[in-house]
Image (tube, helix red, strand yellow):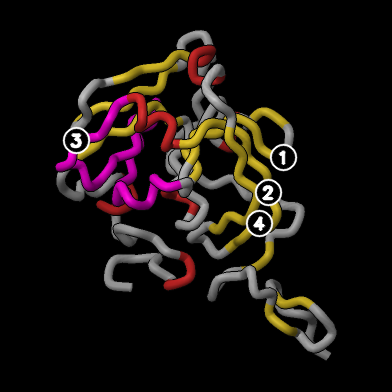
């Protein structure tokens, strides 16, 4: 008798409705995948900046950003490499709070997320506003490890996880789409897991 396929639950093999197409449930695993060597970033030198098409460029130190109103995401994450992880909790600050301090100009329609390593990824502004994105430093009640993007990473959980830039250092607001690292290497510009937007042309 064949074993139960990953991502299917129940005696009848009913697919978990939380699982996007083509994904499997990673259960207690949180795979570590990235294109760069893992940096060791000291919180004493960490900064986050909102720049570009804003009324006022704003930067925060580690202590300053952690003093902002806290926000929590409770839910699922999905990686383009086909794993999903359910019921995670992330704590940090809402991107809405950060953008409110910088006051985006009316012409701003896209953002590029910047990393301390030089990694970038592009997103429509609409995908990081209205409670859809966070800068987070705790996962499931523990500080983010360096392997998972600590001390802080971007979290955009409704898109594939490469959009949730590790070791995040800021957001640059633009009036046009500017592909980031993986997008220049064939990945989809937006990356909606429910539409299986994995690669250019999907």
Task: Kindly indicate whether the residue at mark 2 contacts the one at mark 1 (C-beta within 8 angstroms).
Answer: yes
Question: Is 185 a magenta residue?
Answer: no
Residue under the image location 25 percent in, 27 percent down: 51
Left or right? Give the position of 64 relative to 55.
right
Q: Which comes sooner in the sequence, label 2 or label 3?
A: 2
**Given this view, does label 2 or label 3 mark the residue nearer the observer?**
3
Task: Look at mark 1 in the image and give the residue it sits on.
Answer: 140
**Is residue 141 in view from this perspective?**
yes
Highlighted range, magenta? 102-130
Classed neighbour count for the residue bearing mark 1: other residues with Cα under 10 Å, few (<14), some (14–19), many (≥20): few
Q: Separation of disc 1 and disc 2 at Cα? A: 6 Å
Mark 4: secondary structure: strand
Task: Look at mark 4 in the image and give the residue it sits on.
Answer: 85
Task: Kindly indicate whether the residue at mark 3 contacts the one at mark 2 (C-beta within 8 angstroms).
Answer: no
Task: Look at mark 3 in the image and give the residue it sits on.
Answer: 105
- In the picture, the disc for residue 88 is 2
Q: Separation of disc 3 and disc 1 at Cα? A: 35 Å
The image quadrant where one finds the N terminus is bottom right
The image quadrant where one finds the C terminus is bottom left
Residue under the image location 48 percent in, 43 percent down: 34
């Amino acid at each position: 008798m064949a074993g139960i396929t990953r991502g299917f639950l129940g005696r009848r093999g009913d697919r978990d409705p939380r699982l996007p197409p083509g994904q499997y449930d990673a259960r207690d695993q949180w795979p570590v995948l990235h294109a760069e060597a893992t940096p060791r970033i000291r919180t004493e030198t960490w900064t986050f900046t909102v720049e570009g098409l804003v009324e006022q460029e704003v930067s925060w130190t580690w202590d300053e950003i952690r003093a902002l109103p806290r926000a929590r995401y409770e839910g699922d994450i999905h990686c383009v490499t086909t794993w999903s992880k359910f019921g995670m909790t992330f704590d940090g600050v809402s991107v809405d709070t950060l953008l409110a301090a910088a006051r985006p100009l009316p012409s701003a329609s896209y953002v590029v997320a910047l990393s301390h390593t030089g990694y970038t990824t592009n997103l429509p502004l609409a995908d990081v506003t209205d409670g859809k994105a966070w800068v987070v430093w705790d996962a499931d009640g523990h500080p983010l490890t360096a392997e998972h993007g600590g001390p802080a990473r971007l979290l955009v959980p409704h898109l594939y996880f490469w959009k949730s830039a590790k070791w995040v250092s800021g957001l640059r607001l633009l009036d046009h789409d500017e592909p980031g690292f993986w997008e220049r290497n064939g990945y989809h510009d937006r990356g909606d897991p429910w539409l299986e937007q994995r690669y250019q042309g999907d």
